[in-house]
Amino acid sequence: FGNELNMSTAGIAMEGEGIGKALLAEPYVEWLKEVHRIRKEMGAEDKVKIMSFGVAGMDLKFVDKLRELGGWDLVEGFALLPGRGNVAPDYPVSDPFAPWKVGPKGGYWNYYGSVKTAALMLKEYGGDKPLWLTEIYAPTFPNSFWEDSLRHGTENLVLTYALAQAENVKSAMWYQLFDSVWHNRLGVSEKDREYHFGLVNRDQSLKPLVLAYATTAEALDEAKFNRWLKLPDPDLKGLLFDTPRGPVSVLWSRKDGYTLTKKVPNFPSPEPWVETWKTKTELSVPVAGDALTAIDPIGRKSEIPAKDGMAALT
């Protein structure tokens, strides 16, 4: 019910009287009471559930105010819009085994910081409300250092969903299917980043992100998160999932850091076939059978033979 109401100004969340000020908390609670009244009058309590508005960034101040005003008991789920700029989805969690600290880098405009903070908050508040991510994305607005390149967006989609699964997210909704905006369907604007959030180009050709979406859905179908993998090199990261088809691991490296692009004048977007992660690291992993199946972000599979129960990945 509602969207981004913690952004009280027309500007972005940390501008002016935006995120952290909770200026609209009181009227929002009054609206929630009205919705509850109408739902009761219609006899629809069992059919209609009420989720919070999509909170822009993990705005703890707004949620604290919501609880103070009695609004927390008026929602049956929590909706979050975790933002992200030119950093990887797992930034800033450099050590997943350390206690999570909420702070300026852990609570607001980055993806995993927001999701992790929300998941811990919900657990602290009783664990009875599911977490929904009602807008996750990898915008590919060209020639902008703040957005994803087509290649980074493809990689980041896989990691975005894997991290959501690791934090027991109930539903993660990708924003959105097509480039363009709702009020100008299949329209175009070279000056507006909002036109470039799709999995599909406006001419209806596919971005590589579509392949990553399908690959992730297939690999993590019915998956249950097992644990973070403790790898011998701290710059190598891994998530382990149990699936009906056997164990699935999502592996990645942060040897080259978490920042995707640097701000330079007249920034040119790299082509998707140009590999931007330069450092290569070999990793030996245990294998139960004769070979390991490796799947890249766009779904290409390769069989890596095992020797003495181990397979070598790069």
Image: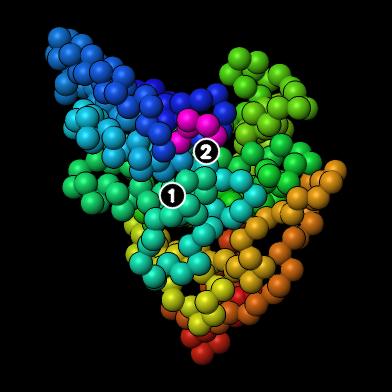
Q: Which residue is mark 2?
A: 14
Q: Which mark is residue 50?
A: none
Q: Quadrant of residue 76?
A: top left
- The correct choice, above or below, for 175 with respect to 255 in the image is above
- Name the one closer to the observer, 62 or 149: 62
- Name the one closer to the observer, 128 or 170: 128
Whether residue 126 sits left or right of residue 201 in the image: it is: left
Query: Which range of residues does the magenta coloring cover?
Result: 15-19
Image point (52%, 45%), residue name: 109
Q: Earlier in the sequence, mark 2 or mark 1?
A: 2
Q: Which residue is mark 1?
A: 107
**Where residue 81 sits in the image (x, y, percent)?**
46, 37
**Where residue 190 sits in the image (x, y, percent)?**
78, 27
- The correct choice, above or below, for 26 with respect to 174 in the image is above
Q: Secondary structure at mark 1?
A: loop
**Is-magenta flag for residue 57?**
no
Whether residue 145 sits left or right of residue 109 in the image: it is: right
| Residue 32 visible at all | yes
Looking at the rendered structure, the kind of residue marked 2 is: Met
**Where residue 296 sits in the image (x, y, percent)?**
62, 59
* Furthest residue toward right: 266
Name the image quarter holding the N terminus: top left
Name the image quarter holding the C terminus: bottom right
Whether residue 297 sits left or right of residue 202 in the image: it is: left
**Where residue 225 sits in the image (x, y, percent)?**
36, 59
Contact check, label 2 and label 1, Cβ < 8 Å: no
